[in-house]
Image (cartoon, coloured by chain):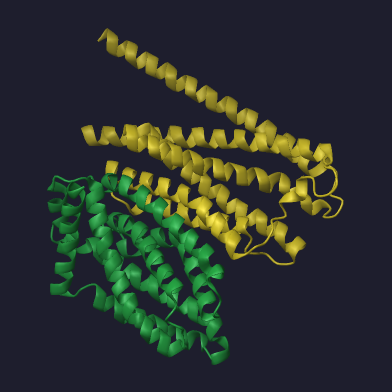
């Protein structure tokens, strides 16, 4: 078991350390997420009567767009500084590398979302203290990271990489986006657990399936 | 030297044989398409409620079937390519994906053409149309990845991974769009919707399903052969160019 966890945590620690020193991922993500919300506000003019209809969409458009931005950076640094070769030379399974990179992206996204949520709560009068919503937030973010990391590893080696990542990511992530927006709508309307438990179930299925598939196929993406 | 000549001859015969198969398949396809058009547009009776509009189902349903068949082949060929690493599987996956995108486009077009007179609008977010649209996006991304991705084996592996992830995503997308819009498909158009089905309608639908499958096989064979030839030429360029 430690043959999996120790190298995996080492990869994660490397990414966290890199971020702590360079601050190249979370801060730009946050700024971008905030900008999206502001632009969204001008685009739809959410008067109090409209908030319930507009807030969930604005929240998740902001989170997914910012998430894409963070995911672009996941392998950009590795590519620029030749870190990919270093990772490839480590004598560990590719699923270990995948999980390490995945947890890094997941934590960065979650951090950005955690900072954004109170801002959102203030702007849209959004109820924050709903545990079911936090569960959904964590599961949805995990789902984004699960497919996002493998697509990011591909996109970094393509021409027009800034375009390739969203083009690959959004269609696959549609179930999570639907689930997240619908469940958030339930939260805003003050509905109970039974209303959004099915969305949590859907997101869980997505997460389990794509974590397994991505971890299995990640090695093929890394090979040169 | 003699073996080389012999090898050339066998290869020549194989290519020639392949060409004949293709020509024969083209002929069969042309006849079957003509027969299906006649059956679907003239021979089958008009629908009791929808009238002639319902006839588009003899094309919409087979097109949808071929679309899903194509993406299923992409899925299987992608797995086979990752496991075996032989180029043939990669050519097959790429060829099937191209035809799949063509048919996915036609699913959306024929679905909309049917929707306008029946629903009064071109588009409804039914689970079927939603899933077809997302499918269309996924496999357009697949083609883009083929174009913009790295050359050679790496690009082929990227595409294979997307071919697997994309196909697994389809049922999840379908299920989520059902939960999202709890609407029913007009799927019972040629099924027991309270009354009994006109047998001739069922016959035409079956014939059109077979025709579309034959048409698909022909297109796939053409594309696959062309792709294989292109790869051979490229290899020769690298060797002698």
Q: Nearer the viewer, residue A191 or B83?
A: A191
In this rendering, position of residue B45 left or right of residue A144 = right
| Res. B110 in view | yes
The chain drawn in green is A
Residue drawn 25% across the image and 10% down it = B1
Residue drawn 41% across the image and 90% down it = A122
Instruction: Report which quarter residue B114 is drawn in.
Output: bottom right
Is B231 rendered above or below residue A83?
A: above
Q: Position of residue A205 (x, y in %)?
A: 45, 55
**Total numbered labels placed on residues in the image:** 0
In this rendering, position of residue B50 left or right of residue A116 = right
Is B160 rendered above or below residue B9?
A: below
Is B185 rendered above or below residue B94?
A: below
Q: Nearer the viewer, residue A189 or B27?
A: A189
Q: Position of residue B221 (x, y in %)?
A: 50, 32
- Residue farthest along the top direction in this orientation: B2
The chain drawn in yellow is B
Instruction: Report which quarter residue A150 is drawn in.
Output: bottom left
Q: Nearer the viewer, residue B78 or B141?
A: B78
Q: Nearer the viewer, residue B113 or B77?
A: B77
In this rendering, position of residue A204 left or right of residue B57 = left
Residue drawn 55% across the image and 44% down it = B68
Q: Position of residue A41 (x, y in %)?
A: 46, 87
Q: Position of residue B92 (x, y in %)?
A: 43, 36
Instruction: Report which quarter residue A39 is drawn in.
Output: bottom left
| Res. B241 in view | no
């Amino acid at each position: 078991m430690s043959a999996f966890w120790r190298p995996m945590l080492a990869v994660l620690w490397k990414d966290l350390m890199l971020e702590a020193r360079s601050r190249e991922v979370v801060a730009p993500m946050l700024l971008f997420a905030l900008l999206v919300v502001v632009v969204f506000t001008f685009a739809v003019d959410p008067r109090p009567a409209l908030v319930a209809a507009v807030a969930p969409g604005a929240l998740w458009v902001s989170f997914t767009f910012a998430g894409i931005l963070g995911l672009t950076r996941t392998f950009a640094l590795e590519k620029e500084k030749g870190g990919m070769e270093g990772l490839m030379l480590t004598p560990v399974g590719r699923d270990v590398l995948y999980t390490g990179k995945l947890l890094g992206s997941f934590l960065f996204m979650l951090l950005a979302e955690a900072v954004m949520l109170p801002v959102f709560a203030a702007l849209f009068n959004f109820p924050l203290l709903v545990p079911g919503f936090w569960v959904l937030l964590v599961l949805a973010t995990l789902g984004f990271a699960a497919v996002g990391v493998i697509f990011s590893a591909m996109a970094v080696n393509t021409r027009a990489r800034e375009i390739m990542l969203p083009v690959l990511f959004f269609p696959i992530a549609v179930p999570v986006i639907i689930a997240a927006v619908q469940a958030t709508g339930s939260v805003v309307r003050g509905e109970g657990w039974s209303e959004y438990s099915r969305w949590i179930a859907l997101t869980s299925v997505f997460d389990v399936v794509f974590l397994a598939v991505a971890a299995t196929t990640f090695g093929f993406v890394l090979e040169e | 030297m003699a073996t080389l000549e012999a090898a050339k001859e066998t290869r020549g015969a194989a290519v020639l044989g392949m060409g004949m198969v293709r020509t024969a398949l083209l002929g069969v396809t042309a006849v079957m398409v003509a027969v299906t058009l006649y059956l679907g547009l003239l021979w089958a009776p008009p629908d009791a409620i929808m009238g002639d509009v319902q006839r588009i189902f003899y094309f919409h349903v087979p097109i949808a079937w071929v679309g899903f068949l194509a993406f299923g082949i992409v899925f299987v060929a992608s797995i086979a390519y990752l496991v075996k690493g032989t180029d043939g599987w990669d050519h097959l996956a790429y060829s099937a994906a191209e035809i799949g995108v063509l048919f996915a486009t036609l699913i959306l077009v024929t679905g909309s053409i049917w929707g306008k007179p029946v629903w009064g609008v071109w588009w409804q977010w039914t689970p079927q149309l939603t899933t077809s649209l997302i499918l269309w996006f996924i496999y357009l991304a697949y083609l883009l990845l083929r174009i913009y991705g790295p050359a050679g084996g790496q690009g082929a592996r990227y595409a294979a991974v997307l071919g697997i992830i994309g196909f697994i995503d389809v049922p999840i997308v379908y299920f989520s769009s059902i939960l999202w819009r709890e609407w029913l498909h007009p799927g019972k158009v040629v099924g027991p919707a309270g009354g009994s089905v006109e047998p001739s309608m069922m016959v035409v639908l079956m014939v059109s399903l077979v025709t579309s499958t034959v048409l698909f096989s022909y297109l796939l064979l053409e594309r696959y052969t062309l792709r294989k030839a292109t790869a051979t030429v490229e290899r020769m360029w690298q060797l002698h160019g």
